[in-house]
Amino acid sequence: MGSGRRGDGMSLDLRWSTDIVTFFNPEYWDMPAEQAYSEWERKVDEDPHRFFDKMLDGAAEAQLSGIELAPAPGGWVNALRAYGTATAFKKELDRRGLVLSSSYVLPIALKAVVDAPDAKSRAVALNRLHEETAQHAEFLREVGCQTMITSTVPRAEFSETAGVEASADSFAKPADPDLMGSIADVLEGAGKIASESGVHLAIHTDAYSLASRVEDIDTLMSITDPNLVKLCIDAGHIALDGSDAVSVVRKHALRAPILHWKDCAAHLPPHKLSGTPMERHDVMIKSFRVMGEKGIVDWRKWTMTLKEQQWSGWGVAEIDMSVDPIREIREGIEYYDSELSQN
């Protein structure tokens, strides 16, 4: 499985997981390829047990050690709905030889805090964020998972009109320091809530966010408490935004309990993305690639950098909405085993 003893100079102390968004392609479920995401969500919501069972079975078939819960409909709320209790969900993982490596939640509640128009609205939104974080963290504690993942917010505004580009300059200019400071404060507050259940809050390096470019990640890490705010470094997202994933792991790997090992075909300028969030996401995922030789991430430098720092943790081998998820998960891990693990 590509794991090794920490600090032996040859291999990483690494366990493999996948984000179950890898299983979200409707064709994998014998549904029409053109099916809307909202319809996929509706069907999972109607019978989460059936869908979760198959995704957990798929992770076990791919010979993984763990899974990462995904955005809705594959998040912790539906895992709880599927099995009734956190304890019952853990038993389903246990009997398949899996553990919960991590759990991702979209930053919807966080963005509501940042976008609040006045102090009263902000207080209400902050209270909601803290309540949701506490509930999520308690679920993770009961399952035995220590890492909750979320994201920041876009560094500039996308065009919501399909086919109409946003301003390239707005994405190219430095991040607003006031916004960065506000985000840092909110993340630390949520991190403190999560820590009360023994859970780390890790920030996913979403492309085009306040945590995808080297300089922005440097800033965010410098103004947040390392005990409260960790990183989830996603090589593919960083590369998609035109930044350097190797530089990020060189500087911040030891603050990252979990890394997403996926690639992308080429830099995709953010101002060219337009439409609704799901329309933009559909374009983005066409650029993602399985870890290997088909993308632009320098995996040899990435792996060597991690070895030099004696990093250990979870590797997430994932590719959003794969038509053939088990094969693609194995393809990435086998590339690591054959080309990277002993180099």
Image: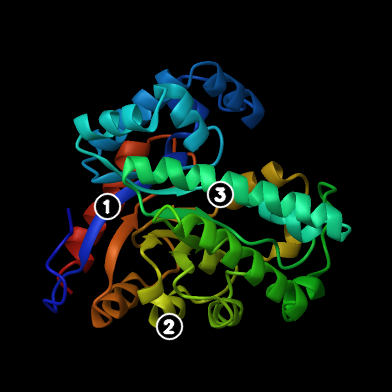
Q: Kindly state the secondary structure of the residue where label 1 is placed.
A: strand
* Image quadrant where residue 256 sits: bottom left
| Residue type (three-letter) at the residue carrying disc 3 | Thr
* Image quadrant where residue 324 sits: top left
Image point (36%, 54%), residue name: 146
Image point (18%, 74%), residue name: 343
* Distance CA(mark 3)–CA(mark 2): 28 Å
* 216 lies above or below 82: below
* 133 lies above or below 59: below
Looking at the picture, how far across and down is residue 37, in whole percent?
Answer: 62, 31
Are the residues flagged by discs 1 and 3 in contact, CB closer than 8 Å?
Answer: no
Looking at the picture, how far across and down is residue 273, in whole percent?
Answer: 73, 56
Among the two numbered marks 1 and 2 on one chain, the one whose residue lies closer to the N terminus: 1
* Distance CA(mark 1)–CA(mark 3): 25 Å
Residue 126 is left or right of residue 135, and the answer is right
Residue 239 is left or right of residue 325, and the answer is right
| Residue type (three-letter) at the residue carrying disc 2 | Lys
Q: Residues within 10 Å of mark 3 (few under 14, many from 20)?
A: many
* Residue that mark 3 sits on: 133
* Residue that mark 1 sits on: 16
Q: Kindly state the secondary structure of the residue where label 3 is placed.
A: helix
Q: Nearer the viewer, mark 1 or mark 3?
A: 3
Looking at the picture, how far across and down is residue 202, in whole percent?
Answer: 48, 62
Looking at the picture, how far across and down is residue 187, in whole percent?
Answer: 60, 64
* Distance CA(mark 1)–CA(mark 2): 22 Å
* 261 lies above or below 109: below
Among the two numbered marks 3 and 2 on one chain, the one whose residue lies closer to the N terminus: 3
Image point (43%, 35%), residue name: 23
Q: Is residue 74 visible?
A: no
* Residue that mark 2 sits on: 251
